[in-house]
Amino acid sequence: MSEMTILYRDEHYIAVDKPAGLLVHRTRISEDSRFLLQQLRDQIGRRVYPVHRLDRPTSGVLIFGLDSDAARRLVQLFEQRQVQKRYLAVVRGYTAESDVIDYPLREEAHKAPQAAVTGYRRLATVELPIAVGRYASARYSLLEVRPETGRMHQIRKHMKHIFHPIVGDTTHGDGRHNQLFRDRFGICRLLLMAAELNFVHPYSGVALSIGTRPDTELAGLFERLGFGSE
């Protein structure tokens, strides 16, 4: 089992580069035997405390507190929208150059919808000469996405809402385009990564920026699509 890549560490916090496909912690319905929380604890030899979440298929920056007070302070910053989050996503179709999606989301069927806001900026586009459905070619956009709120599956649901689902999303996506990426590029994952977190350190007051670059698989795909390296 390979070690987790540590992006940042001090006496209060540790941030890692979460691999795609790895659950953060054990759930009642999961049959997984590996969890990021457990793996990181074993790697550094001490307990870590969750602050925020990334879906199993999402890769990228994930931060933990090294004690309960540190975690609580950073959770408050997330709740107060004082943490700026930047993601990269590949979506179906050509999006607008930039937009803000303000569309409430229901996290559970029996609960009322909650405010959810996501901004995005288009970084690149590509058209592949491959017929999908009734179209003679397939178009995709690379987006920089900045969610202002943190609802479950927010980016994935918002991209579906504007008819530009994320490639590789088996829940909210388009199966035909997911299949194209499996067949053409050998990509069997969600094309969404948490690229950067920015916030003011709760103890030192110093502005922190913790980021990561696309992993080898994503970087190779971006090159093949003509997106280049970020």
Image (cartoon, rainbow, N blue to C red):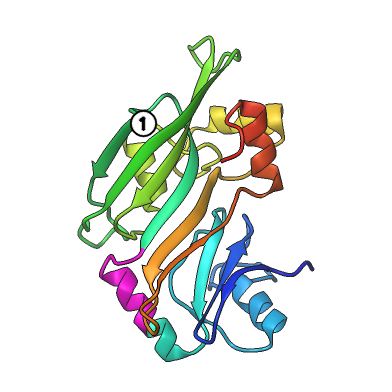
Residue at x 26%, y 61% (from the top left corner): 110
| Rendered location of residue 98, percent (x, y) | 32, 34
| Rendered location of residue 67, percent (x, y) | 49, 90
Please rate how many residues cluster around mark 1, counting C-alpha atoms within 10 Å: few if below 14, some from 14 to 19, many from 20.
Answer: some
**Snapshot quadrant of residue 45:** bottom right
Left or right: residue 97 versus residue 216 is left
Residue at x 29%, y 71% (from the top left corner): 79
Q: Amino acid at mark 1?
A: Phe
Observer-nearest of 199 and 43? 199
Residue at x 55%, y 81% (from the top left corner): 10
| Rendered location of residue 27, percent (x, y) | 54, 72
Residue 191 lies, with reference to residue 24, above or below; the image says above
Residue 146 lies, with reference to residue 151, above or below; the image says above
Residue 122 lies, with reference to residue 53, above or below; the image says above
Would residue 226 be seen by someone viewing this image from the given angle?
yes
**Snapshot quadrant of residue 200:** bottom left
Give the number of callouts. 1
Q: What is the magenta range?
A: 73-83
Q: Furthest residue to the top?
A: 136
| Rendered location of residue 224, percent (x, y) | 67, 28
Residue 155 lies, with reference to residue 49, above or below; the image says above
Is most of the magenta stretch helix, strand or loop? helix
| Location of mark 1 (residue) | 163
- Does the magenta portion include 9? no
